[in-house]
Amino acid sequence: MAKEKILGLTQEEVEKRTKEGLVNKAVNDQFKTNKQIIAENTFTYFNLIFLVLSILLVLVGAYKDLTFLPVIILNTIIGIVQEIRAKRILSKLNVMNMVHVTAVREGQEVQIGVEELVKGDVVVLKAGDQIPADGKVIAGEVRVNEALLTGESDEIIKKIGAELMSGAFVVAGKAYARLEKVGKESYISKLTLEAKKMGSVEQSEMVRSINRLVKWVGIIIIPLGIALFTQSYFFNHAGLERSVVSMEAALIGMIPEGLYLLTTIALALSATRLARKEVMLHDMKSVETLARVNVLCVDKTGTITEPKMAAEKAIKSKAYPKDDLEQVIANFAFNMPPDNETMKAIHAKFNSGSKRATTVIPFTSVNKYSAVVYENKTIIIGAPEMVLRDQFEEYQEEFEAYAEKGYRVVIVVKYNHPLTEEDSALKDKVEVLGYILLSNPIRKEAKSTFEYFAKQGVTIKVISGDNPLTVSRVAKQAGISGSEKYIDAQTIKDDEYEEAVKNYNVFGRVKPEQKRKFITALQNLGNTVAMTGDGVNDILAMKKADCSIAMASGNSAAVQASQVVLLDSNFAKMPDVVNEGRRVVNNIQRSASLFLVKNIFSLLMAIFALLLTINYPLQPSQITLISAFTIGLPSFLLALESNHNRIRGKFMPNVLARAIPGGLTDWLAVGILVIAGSYIQLDHGQVGTTATMLLIAVGMMVMYHISAPLNKFRTGVMAISFIGVIGAIIFFHRLFSLTALNNHSLFILVILFFAAITIFRWLSRILDGVAEVLVVFDQKRLKMTLGDMKTAYERGKQKN
């Protein structure tokens, strides 16, 4: 069907099909409705527990112990507002970054959004496009890669009448296709949803650890609460009100109600901050993964260099006697459509061609060359290794010097047989005519960006389809460490990938299916790997990587398949993304330690109370006071601090190492207080108030420990917390069930305070040493020696 006969749909037909629902709109359930967000934040397991606890307090008339309720309500409201706000920002960014395609309507080619296509629309497909819906070729011819559908990377020729599946990618040629299955009926809907939800199932380490903690707390508190109430009411014969109040104080102390909220808000705020810098996150948790990355895989073109390519000049081979090389190239360009960057550059430089070819064989990533046929001979332009084959060493010296200068070299040869698309394999020798020197300018910001990663201990692996020597030279110009270590990927056997990624930093002549093998090999060696990409051939590797980053100027499918999208395609934004991730993880890690101090103490104290058959010494209102000013307020303020320190070790061991000393100190101090109080007959009010003072004092010590070394911001946070707690004690002591301490209580408080300082310092040094050992073990695993363990332990003990 000739192009001029393709009219496409009329506006009336489009409107009719739109009304019938025959639109290519994916059923995107990635964004929850506001109603779903409100329901999910309100009807949580812990909110149900808090509701039951509140009802019990009301029934026994302990209204002042409901002080925890405003905090829970506020937490729920903040969670709802923040999630709705984050959803709006991300959905707006998705609209801004909507993928467009060329369609024919009423005889005119127009750019429209993929989701505006209707059944029966005619679309124009060319190299680099993702097929937007299932259809059939009605004009032209294309080569497509259906790797995402079938797992096979072979390219398939699609001629008139051939079926096209949505989700496949056009790698060469141009065709017109009529869409037959759109929207939820097409494969693209499922593919897009799958690409966008990457990481939602396999959550980041931090979120996974917090979820596990919340799950176990949820399992423990119900039987423990029943046991505490039973003991207090039936065995200790305390009244109903006191039994309920003491049981609830223990349970409230064990629930990390603010930790999960803090994590969600911190991640959402990060997404917002990055959005302002034109960085979109398809998955908020990916910012943590990227912060933990220690290997970053990048392509040469579009990342290290500008995406545009320029043809510098043509160099005649020593063996070619004629002076018509430039005209041969111009004639080649005259017949070959500019459907990739190489051909665009050749077209721009050599544009005086006029000789018509009988057959045109477009470039494919498998052959790595394109060709034009003139009767019984073929002119080929492509990668020297793939075109020369056994003749490579014979001509290597001629062009290798140009590759060493950073040029990309493509070879021009004559093949004395006509090739066809069906049989394009080279079997005989070729006659070398010359070479075309191509260049990609280094991005201005590339050097400083790679210097940043080098300082942060992130190894850069350059994975490119170009000549490894050329890639090595460009990597060196960009300041990439170890760029002199390069290898031709075609020489790597299937069982040699892990050894290769250990020994080399630059990989050339990489085929699309090999990129995924490199990522897998790096992950098998214990690395956290990020992959940048902008093309069809990057997608399989991007989906395999721990974190994927796409340039918005690249292929639309790569953008959809990535977790992080650089909307301005500026790789220099990567340090901002990494720093944002580090801010989130470091601050949440620090704040989580504060939360867990209370949880550890409450759990140990509850078990202690059960074993000694005594009543829990604290009341819910006192737990609220302690939580508000030694946990809640400081943790939210500290989460706002700029903190770009490199992340070391696993989330939960790091948190526990800082929380256990505080939790154990609290338990020992309050346990001794309870026992001593029973001997000198302190009443429940005196014990509760003294315990509250002790826990506040230890809480301040923990805050100081996790904030060391202090700066103005951290000192300010501690001062605000201290002033807040003093103000609450002076003006709201009745609300928090605090009584004036007698001489005996004051004496015990002072003694236990100084004892707590000594115990806390001793435990902190031990646990800091253990934490450092775990960090080194995480890095070295089974290679760790006893000497490494001892050195790490001593180093950790000296930190604070």
Image: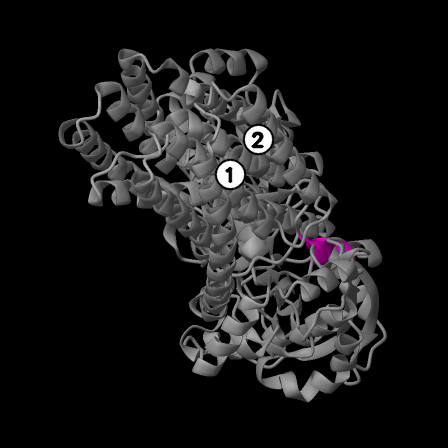
The residues bearing labels 1 and 2 have C-alpha atoms spaced at a distance of 8 Å
Q: Residue at x 23, y 37 (%)?
A: 224
Residue closest to the eye, 398 or 576: 576
Which residue in the structure is indicated by mark 1?
Answer: 696
Q: Residue at x 47, y 27 (%)?
A: 31
**Horizontal arrangement in the rendering, residue 678 relative to residue 391 (left or right):** left
Q: Quadrant of residue 26?
A: top left
Question: Which mark is on residue 228?
Answer: none
Q: Is residue 460 above or below residue 546?
A: below
Q: Dividing the image into 4 quarters, which one contains the C terminus?
A: bottom right
Instruction: Give how far across and how far down residue 764 sits, in percent.
Output: 50, 59
Q: Dividing the image into 4 quarters, which one contains the N terminus?
A: top right
Instruction: Give how far across and how far down residue 127 sits, in percent.
Output: 60, 48
Q: Quadrant of residue 409?
A: bottom right
Q: Determine the secondary structure under disc 2.
A: helix
Instruction: Give how far across and how far down residue 232 sits, in percent.
Output: 20, 30
- Determine the residue located farthest toward the left in the rendered image: 234
**Marks 1 & 2, CB-CB < 8 Å contact:** yes
- Reply yes or no: does residue 643 show up in magenta: no
Which residue in the structure is indicated by mark 2?
Answer: 725
Query: Is residue 195 in view?
Result: no
Q: Is residue 578 above or below residue 2?
A: below
- Label whose residue precedes the other's in the sequence (1 or 2): 1
Residue closest to the eye, 540 or 576: 576
> Which segment did they paint magenta?
334-345
Q: Determine the secondary structure under disc 1.
A: helix
Residue type at the position of mark 1:
Ile
Q: Quadrant of residue 260?
A: top left
Mark 1 crowdedness (10 Å alpha carbons): few <14, some 14-19, many ≥20: many
- Determine the residue located farthest toward the bottom in the rendered image: 394
